[in-house]
Image (cartoon, rainbow, N blue to C red):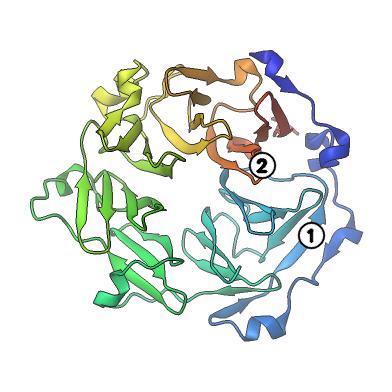
Amino acid sequence: MKQLFKCLPLHLFLFSSVCLASCSTPDKTQLSLDHTNPAAAAVEKGTPVFVRTRADSSFRYFSGIRVLFEDSKGNLWFGTEREGFCRFDGKWFTYFSAWEEWQNEPVLSIREDQQGLLWIKTKNSLYRFNGYAFTTMPLQKCAPTKEDWQIHSGDLWFRAGADGEVYRFDGQRLSHLYIPRPEADSLPGKHPYNPYWVFSILKDKNETLWLGTLSGGVVRYDGHSFTYLNEQDLGFTVNCLFEDSRGSLWFGNNGGGIYRYNEQGLTNLTARHGLSNETLLKTRKVANRAGTAARIFAIAEDASGNMWFGTIDAGLWKYDGKAFTNYTMEDGLPTDGILAICKDRNGLLWFGGRNGAVFTFDGQSFTVLAKNVDGC
């Protein structure tokens, strides 16, 4: 598989020797504060945040890449575990920093609303970006109304906290909502935290909401009632949810592995293809193991309809509908810990991993764009 990897073309991304560049002092002429527009911030609801920006041709993150998102303008956004986030326009990376406010606070999601405003959810805060300025959105906890639980086209949903809760923005106001417990709930004793602590959110093409939880499986909400899916070892944390081009849903579980959900019901493909981590299943404790597809952190579909799954311990898995193919550091990947996958408008797959690793797949070969080298 090593022949699939190639060097980064200089004329395309303008930064060769990325690791060496990331260790150098940035050109001070590239520092700018022009992106902060107080007048624009004043018209936003929330508290304006003073943001310092820096443009650079090199990718300079060293912590894990948790979020990859392409906006409506074709910009790619990278959200990290503890270094904030940046924007890539195909030529320049624009790094945003708000002094220590965004340091050591993982980025959980980046979304765009119907007005083209970006929403960045971190562990403790929610920010909105209008293209010029950032505002911190108030996250008050208040009693929800029946209107708050409605689902409308264009509304945005965000992770909230450890108490089985989510935030919903309907275009006008932000609502704080708690997931109701099922009547026959035998889960509370399994974990010191609320089993319905939300780790992943998906709203499908039919406007149905799907919530991946800590140990309560997947919760489905159709705008009227809740359905709880918790079987076939799905009780491990559901890190990611995805809807493919055929309408099937995919659940990425941190222990049970890869699940497909469609009109045939719920299928555990990891177990079916003999890729389970039996030690983890038996002990219910973290146990990394190469060659398994058990600890899934990211899901995407390529332009050919193949499904891709990123694991935290065993690299990448590609599924063509019949068989799985595994790619690891032995095949040239910069890391075996894959945290995020995104397909851009040109069909290029982007992968984000541990230690600031970023690489792409164009349908034929992988290209490593950034790799943190120990001691750099």
- Mark whose residue sits in front, 1 or 2: 1
Quadrant of the drawing holding the N terminus? top right
Total marks placed: 2
Residue 108 locus on image (x, y percent): 49, 53
Give the x, y percent position of residue 100. Answer: 62, 63
Residue at 42% in and 73% down: 170
Q: Which residue, as the protein is rendered here, is positioned at the far right?
A: 29
Location of the C terminus (image quadrant): top right
Residue labelled with disc 2: 62
Q: Earlier in the sequence, mark 1 or mark 2?
A: 1
Q: Is residue 39 above or below residue 15?
A: below
Residue bearing mark 1: 54
* Secondary structure beneath label 1: strand
Percent coordinates x, y for residue 110 in the rendering: 55, 57
Whether residue 310 is visible to the viewer of this picture, yes or no, is yes
Q: Residue at x 67, y 14 (%)?
A: 2
Question: What's the CA distance linking mark 1 and mark 2?
Answer: 16 Å
Element carrying mark 2: loop
Residue 268 sits in quarter: top left
Mark 1, other Cα within 10 Å: few <14 / some 14–19 / many ≥20: many
Q: In this orientation, which residue lies closer to the viewer: 360 or 178?
A: 360
Q: Is residue 54 above or below residue 217?
A: below
Q: Is residue 35 left or right of residue 78?
A: right
Whether residue 149 is situated above or below residue 287 in the rendered picture: below
Q: Is residue 39 left or right of residue 23?
A: left
Q: Residue at x 19, y 42 (%)?
A: 190
- Would you say the residues marked 1 and 2 are in contact, meaning their CB atoms lie under 8 Å apart? no
Q: Quadrant of residue 151?
A: bottom left
The disc labelled 1 sits on which kind of residue?
Arg
- Residue at position x 14%, y 54% in the image: 182
Q: Amino acid at mark 2?
A: Phe
> Is residue 144 among the parts visible in the rendering?
no
